[in-house]
Image (cartoon, rainbow, N blue to C red):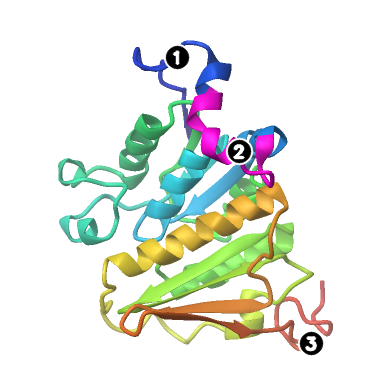
Amino acid sequence: MTSIPPAPPSPSLPSDPATDTCQRFARQLALPEVGVAGQGRLAEARVLIVGLGGLGSPAAFYLAAAGVGTLGLMDADVVDLSNLQRQILHTTADVGRPKVQSAADRLRALHPQTRLLLYPERLTADNAATVLHGFSIVIDATDSVAAKFLIADACHALRRPYVHGGVERFYGQAMTVIPGTTACYRCVFRTPPPGPDAGPPQGPLGVVPGVIGIIQAAEAIKHVLGIGQPLTNRLLTFDALAMTARCVPVRRSPDCPLCGIHTSP
């Protein structure tokens, strides 16, 4: 893990941090649901983003832009040319660079005061407890089914809320989980399929992870602020071809292998 210190303020910005904050977040401060107190909660928040691709890119941008004080950026991959159709944290000049470094550069340019913690590695059963320990909510922006089950299991064990996101072709889905309280990922999807993820990826259309990633960011912001109705016990599905979205009710399953009442702690 490495921490990137805040970059010095741009000469074009006010030198007074308080003035900078008031100007930068003026539109949010004007919202009664946010205000000064809420902006302070965002500044103190610590959000981990696992995956800096199509979902993690917009989620990270909007969390930094909203003033989340600490972002954990976790991804073991390097930028590939095929990523750029949807992974907007990265540019052509970043091809071959570690995604965590590329992402850090873009986010630091957007909001220099955001503290960035970099994890150029994959989340595993061995490191999950150590990594997740310092964060209050997790964005599941991975593209692997196995990784999604791992995040669900680790967040359940540590009682860390997480926002699931998934995309394929022209379709996406999102759901927020409060472990031990709401339906979890395994309540809905039960167990991973046997063997590796099947077949080469199909798509997605580049804008689809953009839509879902922004929804994930909104859910994390609402959680930090304690406002609105979270996307809990509901699976939001999005169809870009039909341009429709709907919420499918889901509920905790008594025999869920992870959080069911018959499951051993």
Give the distance between the C-alpha atoms of the residues marked 1 and 2, in whole angstroms. 20 Å
Q: Which residue is mark 1?
A: 14
Badge 2 amino acid: Ala
Q: Is residue 257 above or below residue 58?
A: below
- Mark number, residue 217: none
* Residue 139 percent across, percent down from the top left: 54, 57
Of tags 1 and 3, the one toward the viewer is 1
- Let me know if residue 257 is in the magenta part: no
Q: Which residue is mark 2?
A: 30
Q: Is residue 201 above or below residue 179?
A: below
Q: Residue at x 46, y 47 (%)?
A: 62
* Residue 73 percent across, percent down from the top left: 46, 45
Q: Is residue 153 above or below residue 58?
A: below
Query: Dot 3 lies on which element?
Result: loop
Displayed quadrant of residue 186: bottom right
Badge 1 amino acid: Pro
Displayed quadrant of residue 211: bottom left
Q: Residue at x 43, y 31 (%)?
A: 111
Displayed quadrant of residue 56: bottom left
**Which mark sits nearer the N-terminus, 1 or 2?**
1
Which segment is the magenta one?
A: 21-35
Q: Main secondary structure of the magenta part?
A: helix
- Mark number, residue 254: 3
Q: Looking at the image, which is closer to me, 195 or 28? A: 28
Q: Residue at x 35, y 30 (%)?
A: 109
Of tags 3 and 2, the one toward the viewer is 2
